[in-house]
Every structure is written in structure tokens, then in C-alpha cells.
Amino acid sequence: METVIDNKPPQGNTAVPAQTLDFKNGYALPRRPTVGTGQDPLLSVNLSHSERNQLIRDIPSLTYGTDTRRPPQLDFIPAHAAYDKKVLRFYGYFRQEVLHSPDEHFRIRPVVIYYHLEDDSMCVTEPPVENSGIPQGKLIKRQRLTKNLQGDLYHWKDLNVGMDMSLFGTVYRITHCDTFTQDFMESQGIVLNESESIPSDPYTMRRAQAQQTHIIPYDHNHQLERFLALDRQVLRFYALWDDSDSLYGEKRPVTLYYYLVDDSVEICEHHEANSGRDPFPVLLRRQKVPKNIKSTCEPFPRCVLEVSPQDVKEYYSPQDFRVGEEVTLMGRRFLLYDCDDFTQKYYEQNHPNIMLKPFTVDTGAQQDIKRAIPPFNGFGSLEDSLQNCLSLIPEPPKKDVIKLLENDNKVLRYVARLDSQNPLDEGRRFILSYYLSDDMISVFERSTRNSGIIGGKFLEKTRVPKPGSSVENPEYYGPADFSIGATVEVFGHRFVLMDADRYVLSYLESLSHHIPEHTLSSLRQTFGVSQSSDWKEQHEGETDGAALVLQN
């Protein structure tokens, strides 16, 4: 029964006790009663100031004595912090009517109802069922739901097991809940009803029944049985095709494959480079090869004979292929001389009475011909001409990139005179430059007044071979060959080295373990240096690239 509170003011001088307590955020707090007017229902004007303070200070006593201990003041915790990530979970279902279907009249769709304690919001989801054909997932998004037409909202106190909830025109039946929900509800003094089970869906149960199947009798020759048992199991034989009876015929190596899954045979020919033959993919495509044909078909030529399965008495089987013997397939003779490991194990397990006798045959494989490089014809450089012999489309010769980067702009310069019997060449002086980046040599002649010889470039930058070296394997000049007083022959012209740049001795001293001692001694004697250490101390860091001082 509902209690009706009459808010009419009392008649006459009826005294009503003043209200001195108030609730704020769930806590009882004292407040001072207000002084009313003639329309004030509390009529607190009858209370004095001391009486009002006494009401505030009074603490109710216990039944047995007075508790002198003051209860500790509790810290206030808001709901969003106290009930954060605390969700009540109820399981249930709803019944959906199905119209115009002879197979079903209704469906039972299970749902999960979540109640979020932090803001009293709820959501309803349906667990997905595989191959159901029904859009499933979240049915009602998270929100606060009303429970009646007056707009009252659902609270966790209104939920219980075994009750019906009407949400947006759909009646949901709550059957049970999880352990956390049960513990929470019992801690708040709510007794949960007995759990119920979700009724089974008739249509789902009918689909779950085993469909009628046809039992196939066990048969070794069944195609599916053979496919599952013998798929990718292939016997491989190495054979020689004896085609010596035909014009220009010979014995050619082939590989014979026998597929156990369907008793088909495939023959592939070994292709060799530069053999002059067209590289056909297979010699015999994969097919079942007949072994015995009816006598009525034998008079017909094999090239135009179309053999049907009714005309074939027997096909080739693994018993007909024996290593060491000859087999005739499609009118061609094949000598089986070897097989792989799988084939050998297959015969040992399934046909132990068949003896495999592998032997070695001469397959006539073409021997590797050593390519002889033709002699150099003198056109261009040796490296460029060699590329025409290595590939059909020649490429530029590869260069030592690291050497180019490390020795870029590093040049050894020498002063030389021409060793000639002609007295007109006596006063001619040359600068011989050796480039460390690519081992090339250039010769420059200095012009002399009134000599009658025009100076300038005498030899363009090129590599100079030593006299006596072969044209196919030339030996070129290097920094170790240029010593003071040495003679350098450049394409028939003989040059005698007379002096050198100071950088030459500095560079060769850094590579003293690769340079002959007489070359370093001649340079030290020219510059008047006795030891290499003294030279380094005097000229450390010096890279004099100025022009040479020509001496007469």
C-alpha cells in the first residue's frame, strides 16, 4: 500500500517537531531549522536557540551504556570511482515469432544483459551463432532504460533471476547470472530466485540432427580411395630411348614417370644446351598407356588409331617396369637403367619379388669445351676486345672503383730525356706522369726556344706494357719500375729518368714494403736524403704538385 502524505498546514496551534537532519550525497547532515511564518508547517518559532543547539549536539545513546568512542569519519567516494568497471551480467532469452514458414513457428534467441553500476546504464547483446543468417551482436546500446509508462528507470534492485523485462516492446526473460552478480546482489540483501535453463530452439535442434548419408562400400579400386592414399606418389625411372634404327637416330636419355594414383605414364626428355634440338616440354604426355589391345584393332596403323577403353585389355602397371630391362611404349624402346630412392623403396615394400638391377650407361653427354680466347688484333684496348669474346653483347670492362677513389688526383712525375742516337734529340726534355688511379702513363715535351721542335703532348694517357711481354698477357709498368737512371721503353721510344717530383719519394716511402730498395735509394740519392725517417720529418704533409724544375 502506498502512504499518502498530506502537505496541508496544520490547523490551530498544533505543534509539529522541527526537522533538523538532511541528506546530501547519501550522508545524513544536521541543519538548523528555519523560523517559519504563519504558513510554516514546522512552527519552529516555539524552539529557543539553546534548544536548537541541543538537538544538534544530542547523540542517541546505546541500549547498553553509552559509547564514548566517536566513529571515524569516512572519506567520500563518488559512484564513478567506487563502481568503476563493475558490471552485473544476466543471461536470458527472448522469443521471436516466425510467420509464413513451414519449418519453424518461433525462435529462441539467447541474450546477455549488462548492468553498469557506475551510471545505472544497461545494454543487451546477442552472442553470434555461426551460419545463423540473422544479424546478431548488440541489440540495445548502452543507456538508461525505463521500466514503466511513468518514466521510472531500471535500478539494480529491480533485477532478479526468473523475471521478465519489457524493453522497447520485446520481453526478455532473465534465466541466470554470473558469480560476481550473485555475490553482489546477496551482499546487498537481495535474494535471487532459482536459476532457469534457456529453452532449446526447435529449428536449431533440427539442423543439428545428423543428415542422412550414403555409406560407400570399401573398395581398393575406388578413385577417391586411391586419390587419398596415393596422391603425389610417383615412380621415377631413368632410361635411354633407343632411336638408332631411324635416320640420324641415336640413344637419348629420358626420364619416365609413373603416377600411382591413376596408372598414367609421362616421359620427359633431357635437353642439353646447344644440342640443336627443339626443347619440347615432354616426349609423351601424361596418359594411361595400353599394354594389350584387342586383335581387331591391331591391323590399323598406330598413327591414326584411336583406342577406346573398350578396346584395351590391360594397361601398364608397376610390375611391367623393371630396372635393367627394356620396355616398349607406343612403339618406342626404352632401356631402364636406374631409378630414384622412393621407387626402390616402393618395390621393396609392395613387390619384393621384382629385382632391380641398376647399371651405368653412357648417356653421351656433351663434354664441356674449353673456350680459347683468340689473340689480340691490336684494335682498341685489350680489355675492350676481351669483352667481345666473353659475351654476345659486350659490356664495358669493370674498373676498380675503390682504387679510383683512393688515388684520385695522385700523380707521380718524372723528368726524362730521350735516349736516341740523333744529335738533334740531345736537348729534348720530357715530363713522364704516372697516374696511380688507373696505372696509365702520359708523356709531355717541354718546348725549347730555337730547337725547331714543337713541344706539347708527346704521348696520350694510356697503359704502357713492358718490352718483351706477350700481347695476350701483357705486363704493364708500375711505380716500382721508375728509378732514377732507369730506362723506360714507350712504344719504341726509350726514355731515361733523370729526376722526379718530391711527392714521388714521399709516396713510395709509405709503400716501402712493396717498392724495391734500389728504387728508393736512387730517389734518396737524388734528393740528398740518407734515411726515410729524416725525409718524413722534413717533408711531412708536403704534396708539392708544382711543375718540375728541368735541369740541363
Image (tube, rainbow, N blue to C red):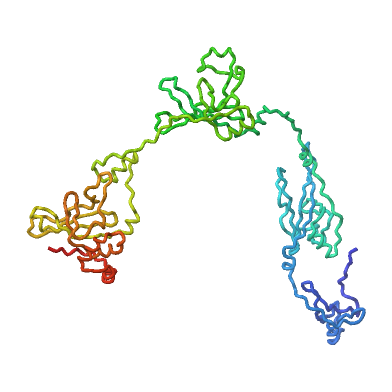
Residue 532 position within the rendered picture, expressed as x and y whole percent measured from the top left? 27, 67
Image height of 42 relative to 225, above or below: below
Residue 55, given in percent of the width and then of the height, sits at 85, 82
Percent position of residue 438, x then y = 29, 54
Horizontal arrangement in the rendering, residue 165 relative to residue 386 (left or right): right
* 63 or 316: nearer the viewer: 316
Please name the residue shown 23% across and 53% down the image.
461
- Residue shown at 60% from the left, 25% from the top: 319
Residue 437 x/y as whole percent: 29, 56
The relative height of residue 11 versus residue 542 in the rendered view (above or below) is: below
Q: Looking at the image, which residue sits at the far right?
A: 64
Disc tally is 0
Residue 259, relative to residue 5: is it above or below?
A: above
Asked whether, in this view, residue 109 is left or right of residue 371, the answer is: right
> Hey, which residue is sitting farthest bottom in the picture?
50
In the rendered structure, the answer to whether residue 369 lies left or right of residue 147 reads: left
- Closest to the observer, 273 or 83: 273
